[in-house]
Amino acid sequence: MKYAIHTLNKAFDHRVRLGVMAVLLANESVSFNDLKESLDLTDGNLASHVAALEKAGYVLVNKQFIGKKPNTTYNATAEGKTAFQEHLAALEKLLRG
């Protein structure tokens, strides 16, 4: 049997990635600006962490234009939702001892 600490997902080690996934699981879709504001991040900080989650297959990035303004929204993928829920379960197990 694995120790709970070994079942934590390294993709969610950083507080920003943990926050991004928490917001995405609570909402179907979130805009770049709303996500940036809710987590109090800079553009570059959010972009780099979302890119890591996208590379892992946990976040889907949707870019489009509304009029002449770019609009980026994010969704958690099914794989991302499962991985994050497993990560939270491992954290709970760790807390219970």
Image (tube, grey):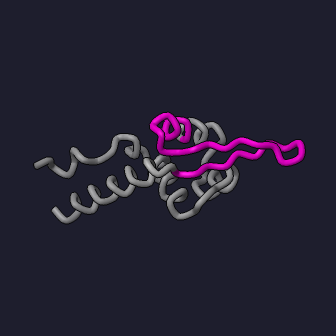
Instruction: Give the camera-side residue of 47 and 72.
Output: 72
Q: Residue at x 20, y 52 (%)?
A: 4
Q: Residue at x 22, y 58 (%)?
A: 94
Task: Give the vertical position of 51 relative to 72 (above or below).
Answer: above
64 in the magenta segment: yes
Instruction: Give the camera-side residue of 3 and 66.
Output: 66
Task: Give the vertical position of 77 relative to 93 (above or below).
Answer: above
Quadrant of the drawing holding the C terminus: bottom left
Q: Residue at x 62, y 42 (%)?
A: 61
Q: Residue at x 76, y 43 (%)?
A: 64
Task: Give the vertical position of 55 relative to 7 (above or below).
Answer: above
Magenta residues span 50-76
Q: Position of residue 27 (x, y in %)?
A: 57, 62
Q: Position of residue 89 (x, y in %)?
A: 29, 59
Which picture quadrant has residue 44? top right
Tell me how many marks there are: 0
12 in the magenta segment: no
Q: Position of residue 91 (x, y in %)?
A: 28, 57
Q: Is residue 14 left or right of residue 9?
A: right
Q: Position of residue 92 (x, y in %)?
A: 27, 62
Residue sitting farthest toward the left: 1
